[in-house]
Each structure stands twice: as structure tokens, then as C-alpha cells.
Amino acid sequence: MKCPICKHGETTDGTASVTLQRGGLTLVVKDVPAQVCDNCGEAYVEEQAAAQLLEEAAAEARAGTEINVRHFQVASLS
Ligand SMILES: [Zn+2]
């Protein structure tokens, strides 16, 4: 797609690091599948991955985790 930030670049498949903050929790997830702009470098995390990260952040916050750095793992279908 065309990048909505710079309006010049095209996005291509790539990965991004995402930082989420929930209450006292800081969660950093690396290698999240994303569309990355070839011009400005803006990353657009894919919707399914973003939803998964929000769920995981909520669970970590409930568990009382303060900081966690991890690599993205596709949720297993069960
Ligand atoms: Zn851009």
C-alpha cells in the first residue's frame, strides 16, 4: 500500500519492534510482522499481530510483569 505518513513510499513486507505499555508493564516485542515503508521507514503492524500483542500485554499486566522483551511468536491455533 502507499504510505499514509509520507505519501511517497510504498510499504513492503518486513518486521518491526513494538513497545506496549499497560499500567506498570512495558512489553517490547521484536520481529513483529509489519508493512514497512521503503521511504520513511514507518512500520504498520498487521492487524492480527496487533490484536495478539494487545491480548498478551493485558495478560502480562494482570500477572504483574513490569518489563518483558521477547520475540514475536505466532499464536498456535488450538
Ligand atoms: Zn512513508
Image: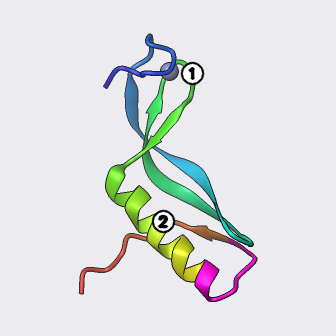
What is the magenta range? 61-68
Task: Identify the residue at horizontal 53%, vertical 75% (top origin).
Answer: 58
Residue under numbered circle 1: 40
Look at the numbered disc 1 and say if its residue's Cβ is closer than 8 Å to ligand 1: yes
Residue under numbered circle 2: 54
Task: Please name the amino acid that badge 2 sits on.
Answer: Leu
Residue most toward the left? 78
Relative height, residue 37 to residue 45 (above, below): above
Task: Identify the residue at horizontal 51%, vertical 15% (top origin).
Answer: 6
Task: Please name the amino acid that badge 1 sits on.
Answer: Cys
Residue 62's disc number: none
Task: Label 2, secondary structure: give it.
Answer: helix
Relative height, residue 49 to residue 12 (above, below): below
Q: Quadrant of residue 11?
A: top left
Q: Is the residue marked by circle 2 packed among few (<14), some (14-19), or many (20+) residues within 10 Å?
A: some
- Check residue 65 for magenta coloring: yes
* Residue 74 image point, x, y percent: 38, 70
Relative height, residue 26 to residue 63 (above, below): above
Task: Identify the residue at horizontal 39%, vertical 62% (top origin).
Answer: 51
Task: Label 1, secondary structure: give it.
Answer: loop
* Residue 33 image point, x, y percent: 42, 52
Which is nearer the eye, 10 or 57?
Answer: 57
User: Could you tell which of marks 1 and 2 lies nearer the N-terminus?
Assistant: 1
CA gap, disc 1 and disc 2 = 25 Å
- Check residue 77 for magenta coloring: no
- In this picture, residue 10 sits left or right of residue 69: left
- In the rendered image, the quadrant that contains the N terminus is top left
* Residue 52 image point, x, y percent: 41, 67
* Residue 73 image point, x, y percent: 45, 71
Q: Is the residue marked by circle 1 packed among few (<14), some (14-19), or many (20+) residues within 10 Å?
A: some
Q: Quadrant of residue 20?
A: bottom right
